[in-house]
Amino acid sequence: MKVLIVEDDQEAARYLARGLGEAGHSCDTAADGEDGLEMALDADYDVLIVDRMLPKRDGLSLIEKLRETDKQVPILVLSALAQVDDRVKGLRAGGDDYLTKPYAFTELLARIEALGRRKQTADFEAVYKVGDLELDRLSHTVQRAGKSIILQPREFRLLEYLMRHAGQVVTRTMLLENVWDYHFDPQTNVIDVHISRLRGKIDKAFDRPLVHTVRGAGYVIRADAD
């Protein structure tokens, strides 16, 4: 899962990120409520872990602002405020779960993994379609105009991500983070190479291309070339 930790205590944030990383999850951190809100709006996270007492914007305000948008990412509120009224306020603000400090890491891990499964169940879409191109996530198959297309695992992930964001421009940074799980630019042409291979398989033998380059921005998959 991809997790955003919004925590102003740097040591606590590092502890969480290290533990979640060892459990196989990818983590970003934000040290204040404003940065946390901006990051939550700009990227697709599976779960947010939000401290209540944050600089610039408190945790409950962050959650309320996020819930005003179409972002329905599950949120675990993590706070030293442990009274019943505090927990109720956290849940009513839009939190999905509330865990008090100090906490057992194993419990936190179990809670966010449960939230992540809930999101995957709610968001799961088995088949993506763009024009005459169809990708089936369950059978791991791709067809265009009824013709089967064989993709390598990374090509499949790349196409899946493009199709999940059909009609939207996908940047290099988005692809590096979500398809390759890089949080830095390796300064290689790995994306260009895979896009070229993907085009050779899903576009070359057909009348109209589906994958388009948006100069200076990234790539988009759509059925029309306009």
Image (tube, helix red, strand yellow):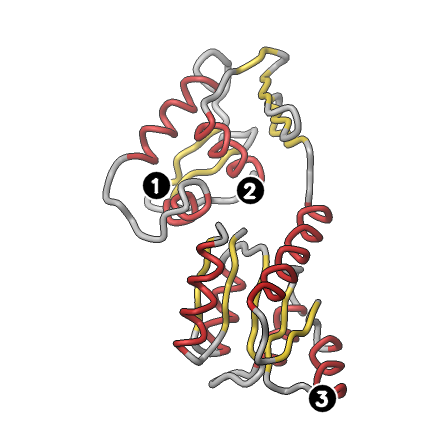
Mark found first going from the N terminus, 1 or 3? 3
Residue 128 visible within the image = yes
Report the front residue among 32 and 166.
32
Amino acid type at image mark 2: His
Where does residue 226 sit, x and y in percent of width and height? 50, 34
The kind of secondary structure element at disc 3 is loop
Kindly identify which residue carries mark 1.
215
Q: Amino acid at mark 3?
A: Gln
**In the rendered structure, are the residues bearing label 3 and label 2 in contact, judged by CB atoms less than 8 Å apart?**
no
Q: Nearer the viewer, residue 220 or 60?
A: 60
Which residue occupies 66% across, 75% down? 64
Q: Residue at x 63, y 59 (%)?
A: 110
Q: Closer to the N terminus: mark 1 or mark 2?
A: 2
Q: Position of residue 208 (x, y in %)?
A: 50, 19
Estimate the x, y position of residue 89 in percent, counting from the top left. 72, 83
Q: Are marks 1 and 3 in contact (CB under 8 Å)?
A: no
Q: Which residue is mark 3?
A: 83
Which quadrant holds residue 131?
top right
Report, in whole angstroms, how far the alpha carbon at label 1 lies from the one at label 3: 53 Å
Residue type beneath disc 1: Arg
Front residue of this view, candidates 62 and 53: 53
